[in-house]
Amino acid sequence: MGVGTGNTVLKVDGVTKTFGGLRALDDLNLTIEEGTVHAIIGPNGAGKSTMLNVCIGQLKPDTGTVTFDGEVITGKQPFEINQAGVSRVFQTPAIFEDLSVLQNVMIPAIAHRDGKFKLNPFSILEKQDDIEGRAVEILERLRLTELMDKHAGSMSRGNKRRLELAMCLVQQPRLLLLDEPTAGMSRHDTNRTIDILKQIKEGGMTKVIIEHDMHVVFSVADRISVLARGHIIAEGTPDEIKGNPVVQEAYLGGSVE
Amino acid sequence: MKKFFANQWLVMLVFSAVILTMPIWLSPIGAGYPDLLQKFMIFGIFAIGFNILFGLTGYLSFGHAAFLGVGSYAAVWSFKLLTMNVLPAIIFAIIVAGLFSVVIGYISLRRSGIYFSILTLAFAQMSYNLAYSVLTPVTNGETGLQLERADPRIIDSLFVEPTEGLPLTNFFSLSLSGYEGFYFCAAFLIIGFFISLRIFRSPFGLKLRAIKSNQTRMQYTGFSTKPYLLSAFVISGMYAGLAGGLMAATDPLAGAERMQWTASGEVVLMTILGGVGTLIGPLLGVGIIKYFENIFSAINENVLMAAYSGLPEGLQHFLVTVSSPFVGEGWHLTLGLMFMLVVIFLPGGIMEGFDRIKRLLMKPFSRNKDAVESAEEGH
Ligand SMILES: Nc1ncnc2c1ncn2[C@@H]1O[C@H](COP(=O)(O)OP(=O)(O)OP(=O)(O)O)[C@@H](O)[C@H]1O
Ligand SMILES: [Mg+2]
């Protein structure tokens, strides 16, 4: 499609990860091009979430390396990887349930501005207009402004997902990793999320999206990789994947809408 | 609440007025005397600091009395070696307690949850036992560290002739006994409260609350959480050191019993009773517990008889018999029952009680917001 810049932003190189006797990732190789939306599809238990866990420093691979922006990030702390420009939406929403929706978005905005550690015990939160302004702007884009003062933990699952997306977007990451961002959402909310994901495409941000919903995948993806039993079994443009008999058989079951 | 705290100078004005007039409004309930007022202030500082750690980050330390004890020793040493002026003593108390808490915090924060609590408890008990044994040269063991006429007092000896008896603590020319001592401690409480207010409203405070809510998310959001936790730990340790220093300033001796686990437990109870993570709650907890300890414990049958004196004799005797287990020596029973009731029915402490009353009164006005929410969820 030629939307990317041609540069590699993320490279997963020969990564293996075992849990006891289970090979969740088995010599996984994957290259993500800067500026693209890259979908990863595959059956349950294929290792998709595990791959993201390795990428953000939550898990250390047994062998292999992950390179972000030309730098090896395997072995780095999660906060270092985030500060380098990688944000993730989790499969189960990971938000600050006890805080307000606005505060949930202000915190990543502060991380983006202040770095991993800055002691500012005497500046006043309500006077940080830059932070609050950016948080409100993102909440408006995700149509969460009405819920701004709500307790984040009291929201519906779909809203929590959108909130988590807002938390990632406010950091303006170079690489956004999305683990089933529309799971559990109504059709209406799913379409809204697709629109948002398409919008931020124009920002030049690279996105990796794990998704079971083929409607979402074929609406947003520039490239698709199919992951099964811990490694990539096929890769290509949406049209190539649709027409790939191996994929049809292994995963799509022949019926693509 | 948010609006109210938004004008911090107004808050501070009201707060200072309430604190400084305590001798007046506490005397009708028998608590307006300097000794108890000083205790309110000193433990108030201790609890405010403790709440910065426990209330904001959720890390429950069971060893904060150690920092209080260390502060007391540091202050008494300053009286012995340098001067009877309390200012350097208090500065030393804060610094030494701060250094101690860096070490203990650094090690204890390698774990979280119950393991963190156990580590802090172990450290505090270790300090307590060392004070009685190996560290006797520094702590004077069971006797406690006291002033002596023969102490060098290097700075004082340059300026003043030694007096006949033991010298008294002073703040330049001001003596610190009685009400002066109370006002001196009250000034520190007001400053301590202001700092806590600012921390609560700062990005730092928000980050601490976010760590309490979801520490893992904080790490994936780009924050190195350990340094934040250590900062909160050290700040609260310094508050404890200040409290210990003030104890020594109003009564210049220091004993290891201040570091015992019961003393650490007391500040936990105070904070929970009043309301963890609220600005005012810990102070309410201090007020109630210290009031019970000092006033309720002094009520005996004669006092009760007098209280029920207007009633028929049979009823009077009955009421005295029924209430006497709860007063005097029985004050622990009353406090224990109250603590249980609060924890069971108001897990957020007395402040949650206030909050519920407020919400009940405000209910008719908040309908609109709920409507928006349900419309949003309905898609
Ligand atoms: N921390 C862990 N400990 C043990 N086993 C794990 C762990 N994480 C994942 N697994 C196992 O590894 C395999 C891959 O899991 P993973 O979560 O990556 O799958 P997935 O492709 O994301 O599946 P889904 O579509 O259901 O989310 C599964 O069999 C899972 O049970
Ligand atoms: Mg998964």
Image (cartoon, helix red, strand yellow):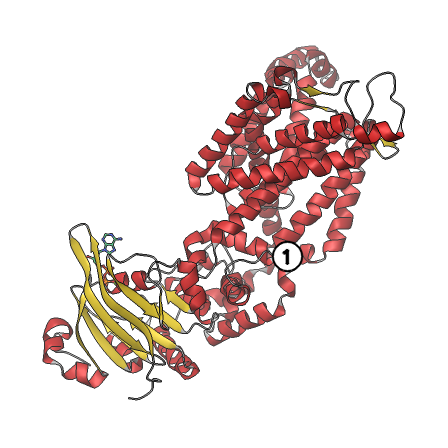
Any part of residue B39 in sight: no
Where residue B207 appears, as percent x and y from the top left, is 53, 55
The image quadrant in which ligand 1 is located: bottom left
Spot occupied by residue B280 in the image (x, y as percentages of width and height): 65, 43
A171 sits to left or right of A65: right
Q: Amino acid at mark 1?
A: Lys
- Give the image location of residue A132, x and y in percent: 58, 68
How packed mark 1 is, by other alpha carbons closer than 10 Å (few <14, some 14-19, many 20 or more), is: few
Q: Residue furthest bottom?
A: A2
Q: Residue at x 51, y 35 (%)?
A: B343
For disc 1, the marked residue is: B2
Q: Residue at x 35, y 62 (%)?
A: A56
SS type, badge 1 = helix
Vertical arrangement, residue A179 with respect to residue A255, above or below: above
The residue positioned 47% from the left and 40% from the top of the image is: B107
Where the C terminus of chain A falls, by quadrant?
bottom left
Please tell me which residue lies in front, A60 or A90.
A60
- CB at mark 1 closer than 8 A to ligand 2? no
- Describe residue B377's horizontal placement relative to residue B322 as left or right: left
Q: Quadrant of residue B4?
A: bottom right
Residue at the location (46% across, 61% down)?
B222
Q: Is residue B43 visible from the viewing direction of this image?
A: yes
Foreground of the two, B268 or B312: B268
Image quadrant occupied by the N terminus of chain A: bottom left
Tell me: A40 left or right of B252: left
Chain letter of the residue beneath label 1 in the structure image: B
Q: Residue A173 sits in which quadrant?
A: bottom left
